[in-house]
Amino acid sequence: VITHSSSLIARERLGSREGLLKRDFELLRICLLETTWLSSSSLLSFRQSMWRSILQEMVVTKCDLELFVTAITELLSGSTKEGKIQNLSRAEWAAILKCDKMDEFAIQAGIDSLMEFRNHSQQILTAADSRGDESDDADTDSEYEFDMDKRSLFLHCCVGLASDASTVLVNDRVVHEWISITCNKQNRSAFGRRRHPGNEDVLNPLLATLLALAQLGSTSLDQEQVAEVILESWRE
């Protein structure tokens, strides 16, 4: 799992690792679901411990965010070649996957995404101001957009908004922390203009995730937080 998911390995091997990682998590799903020999009181604890151990190693080795979503999608799919393994409900999966380590991972990913978006936009604006025009580095922009897409996919997956993974992986405190860092006035003043110049399609992945939650009427946000997110989107 570690070798197949780490972002430290060259991206050119992403395709081959995706298939191997799917197989890894198919085996993990079978292991988690075939522990019926345990008593009901010990079963959930055992499953949580197994997941946390694997997640811990994936975080330490800087797992690729896109591959993480691929792995979670496979884990939740409930299909095997034999078709004999009965899947769990979304609530049962959430009870296994939600943990402090997953919350910390998601919060840090949100912070990193926000800072990367705002730093990149500010760098381009600063360079454009000094030259009198905007950057035309297509290769850099393409790489950046690919990175933003991966971050957005991961953040959406954390809150159950990924197309093939609708189980919420984090507790509400993660969403509250995301709102706090996104709508922080100090962060806002430190960056000044933050809209990505020259490409209106490049969105702040964290803010876009929060807007999607607000639009869906998620119970993770109260009305005041929804208003904060909408106002921040206008400023952005």
Image (tube, rainbow, N blue to C red):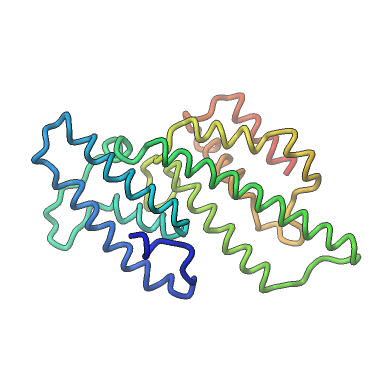
Residue drawn where x is 74% and y is 55% of the image: 121
Residue 112 at what x, y percent from top left? 60, 49
Relative image position of residue 186 (x, y in whole percent) = 75, 34
On the image, which quarter does residue 88 sit in?
A: top left
Quadrant in the rendering for residue 19:
bottom left
Instruction: Give above or below for 100 relative to 123.
Output: above
- Look at 38% across and 45% down and name the residue there: 166
User: Looking at the rendering, in which quadrant would you find the C terminus?
Assistant: top right
- Relative to 55, 226 lies left or right: right
Residue drawn at (52%, 35%) of the image: 175
Quadrant into which the N terminus falls: bottom left
Identify the image quadrant of residue 93.
top left
Q: Position of residue 229 (x, y in %)?
A: 63, 35
The residue that appears at 33% across and 63% down in the rendered structure is: 21
Q: Where is residue 33? Give x, y as percent.
A: 18, 46
Number of callouts? 0
Left/right of residue 45 with respect to residue 10 in the rendered view: left
Q: Is residue 16 left or right of residue 220?
A: left
Q: Nearer the viewer, residue 71 or 62?
A: 62
